[in-house]
Amino acid sequence: MSVDVTDSTRARERLAILGEAGKRIGTTLDAMRTGQELADLTVPLLADYATVDLAESVLLGEEPLAHLGPQGGRIPAFRRAGLASVRQWDPEPLFARGEPVPVPLASPFTSVLHSGQSHFEPMLDTSPGTWLDRHDAVRAAIRDHTMHSLMVVPIHARGAVLGVAVFVRTADRVPFEEDDLLLAEELVSWAALSLDNARQYARERSTALTQQRHLLPHHATGGSAADVAWRYLPADSHHDVGGDWFDVIPLPGARIAPVVGDVVGHGINAAATMGQLRTAVRTLASMDMPPDELLAHLDEQVIRLAEEDADPQDPGGATMVATCLYAVYDPVTRQCTMARAGHPPPAIVDPHGHVTFPDLPTGAPLGLGLVPFESVTLELPENSVLLYTDGLIEARNHDLDAGMNRLAAALARPGLALEDLCSSAVDPLSCEASCDDATLLLARTRQLGPNQVASWEFPADPAVVSRARAQATRQLNQWGLEHLAESTELIVSELVTNAVRHSNGTIGLRLIRHEALTCEVTDTSNSQPRLRHPRTTDENGRGLLLVAQLTRRWGTRHTPNGKLIWAEQHLTAHP
């Protein structure tokens, strides 16, 4: 008895190849790698030579075209993503992997792109009068590689064409059969789903990265308080963009508030949340809160955002968590007050290059509503470097202490310019694939000298108002700011008068000349002044209204012994 088992053998071989496809195609969300995996699988199992060309829109994460026909008279751009051959490229292929590939006009390739149907040519016709007459380079490649059987299969998914795969047999191998075309189409369909996933991932990652870079500061400056340098390294292309952010917020009295944070999670949602928190921190900083109070309010904000995004059917299911390190540096006193919420500790590099990590209370991450936050105040030598980081000391295969020691060694270089110091800490990381974003913020502190600050103390007596005005005028003359004397006299008079009226302790007056002229008055009262809009018949309530009109901005904040009212003026005359 004779039994023909050819069909069953082919079926088993076909199933085996499809099984391999499930293991070897689409192992990552990288479209270029997926294209190469498709080419590698089909050679030599199906073909002697295979190429995979993808539309540029796929690689860029853009929306693919429903039909890749001529756009404005020409075919959209393609790029070679996969290339495999049984030969050692003798001669070299026309287009290497990664190079742009022009599509021959009036050829099987264009017909495939137009129709979305495969082109099957078991015996490749190279005789005169075919489409090869207009493409001498292609005809030469066919001849040099002894190509005799051709299949061109479109790569399409979800109603859009992503590219084209070409399969060729050469030399004395038998021509393609109909079963080979069916197998090729199934393999390409398998790869197409992975390629479309990679395209969507690339689009989301590009959107998140653009959003994050737009939300991060582009011209952060430390003003008169510090020189600032920073670096931001996004995660590698195999991982989503994280929620890292940083900022340097100017505060009254020449102070600055450096801040670094990280939203737990990746992608567009993390980048959007990062933008919300950065805005919230700037708003809270404008209220001049101590770092521990600011983090407490920010914690409440994160919890509120999570509740608003929660599913009404599962209100406890949504959780938003972030870490943050916030500090306030005063260049007059050289004091830096810091607090952190689950964030890695900062580093302080003294002028001699000695690196320390201050022992700050860790605090719980934002969004959990657990333990209260605590602030720590340090006095920093001039020209110290404050370092805030996320991602640089947290690495796979290394614990946190090893990362901190590695970072300390990179920073222990006194005299190095701040930008160079920033590069020396980040450059080694940029050469490695990272699964998370890395942020580095450096601030080299300054101190305002005696020629920039003048302060006095007075008893709470109405008679001291004229003396305070005279002291302020004399100091402005020494600084060459005579043009601000008249307005400053009025500001000092109003603020000191209010302090005398509402306080019974010592009254302080301080002038700070930096990028602006700041006038500060302190007293022992905790009452907050309010800006009023008096009627024409009212006898009081015009003091702060006058201060607001004479200055570019004014405000108040609590101090350990009472409150401080400040007012800023431009150094140059403004209309």
Image (tube, grey):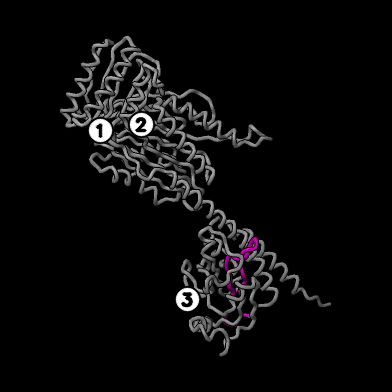
For residue 279, above or below residue 235: above
Magenta segment: does it hold 172?
A: yes
For residue 501, above or below residue 564: above
Horizontal placement of 181 versus 55: left or right?
right
Residue on which disc 3 sits: 94
Q: Residue furthest left?
A: 478
Question: Which residue appears at 55% of the width and 55% of the height?
Answer: 29
Residue on which disc 1 sits: 514
For residue 26, above or below residue 315: below
The residue segment tinted magenta is 152-173
CA distance for labels 3 and 1: 64 Å
**Residue 468 is drawn in which quadrant?**
top left
Q: Amino acid at mark 3?
A: Leu
Find residue 357 and name its label: 2
List x then y, in percent, for residue 125.
Answer: 60, 85
Q: Count up the numbered dots.
A: 3
